[in-house]
Image (cartoon, helix red, strand yellow):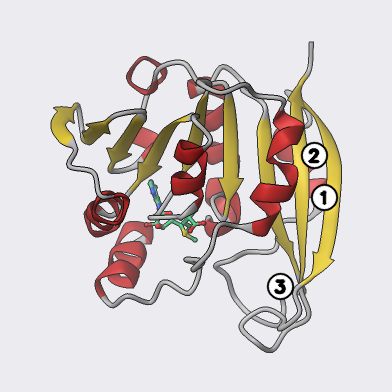
Amino acid sequence: MQHDFWHNRWQTQQIGFHLSEVNPLLLDYFATLSLTAGQRVFIPLCGKTLDIHWLLAQNFQVVGAELSQLAVDALFAELGLVPDIIQAGELRHYQAANIDIFQGDLFALDQATLGKVDAIYDRAALIALPPEIRNRYSRHLAKITATAPQLLISFHYDQSLVQGPPFNVNASELTALYGGNYRITLLAENNLPTGLKRQYPAQEKVWLLTPLE
Ligand SMILES: C[S@@+](CC[C@H](N)C(=O)[O-])C[C@H]1O[C@@H](n2cnc3c(N)ncnc32)[C@H](O)[C@@H]1O
């Protein structure tokens, strides 16, 4: 059901979530992860985000997971890269210099296949998932990345006004999902100037998740 929804979004190009620029919040807050060039950043549910272009230009390694083959093909075309593609269990592994993308269901990706990850960048991943899947997602993410630090962007609005995605994920839910593994620090909160879906008042928040000792 969920998969059909996203495949349909890509087939019909209803991809309003895709930004036509690098996310300004990534530019402003990526440094809080204290990474050095060459380290490997995991982007779950990556789409074809331009944030990948920026991370590669900063000499980071990027690894992503994305359900839609259309999105992954578009990502590599827009990067101007021709990937090697091999089957990795249920997933297809697209590989080029400094970039690995696993096309298929994130929940089919295991730690050995993903490889070492130094940080996670979650923009529109957790909030793309309905409530009943978010708990499974947060546990899976912690497991396959050995609880790597995260930069996470969430959305906040009155869920009774409109259905997701994106879903409202409030601070108490974040604590329930991640508080057992991470110290959670709010870095910024901004009102969306045009609101959500151009109608509903909404805020975007940026969080740093630091693994507990
Ligand atoms: C809201 S979009 C965000 C894309 C990207 N992070 C961005 O900021 O542009 C969510 C993406 O997750 C993908 N997706 C949804 N469920 C998935 C799953 N189970 N495994 C992998 N990708 C999935 C969708 O195809 C879609 O591209």
Which residue is most to the top?
A: 213
Q: Residue at the location (30% across, 68% down)?
A: 10
Of 44 and 38, the residue lying toward us: 38
Give the vertical position of 200 relative to 151 (above or below).
Answer: below
What percent of the width, then of the height, locates residue 89? 19, 27
Distance from the alpha carbon under mark 3 to that under mark 2:
19 Å
Q: Is residue 88 visible?
A: yes
Which of disc 2 and disc 3 is earlier in sequence? 3
147 on left or right of 187: left
Q: Residue at the location (71% across, 30% down)?
A: 33
Residue of label 3: 159
Circle 1: residue type: Ala
Residue of label 1: 171
Instruction: Mark 3 and mark 2 in contact? Answer it, CB < 8 Å.
Output: no
Circle 3: residue type: Gln
Q: Residue at the location (45% across, 55% down)?
A: 49
Q: Residue at the location (62% across, 21% down)?
A: 36
Tag 2, which secondary structure? helix
Tag 1, which secondary structure? helix
Residue of label 2: 175
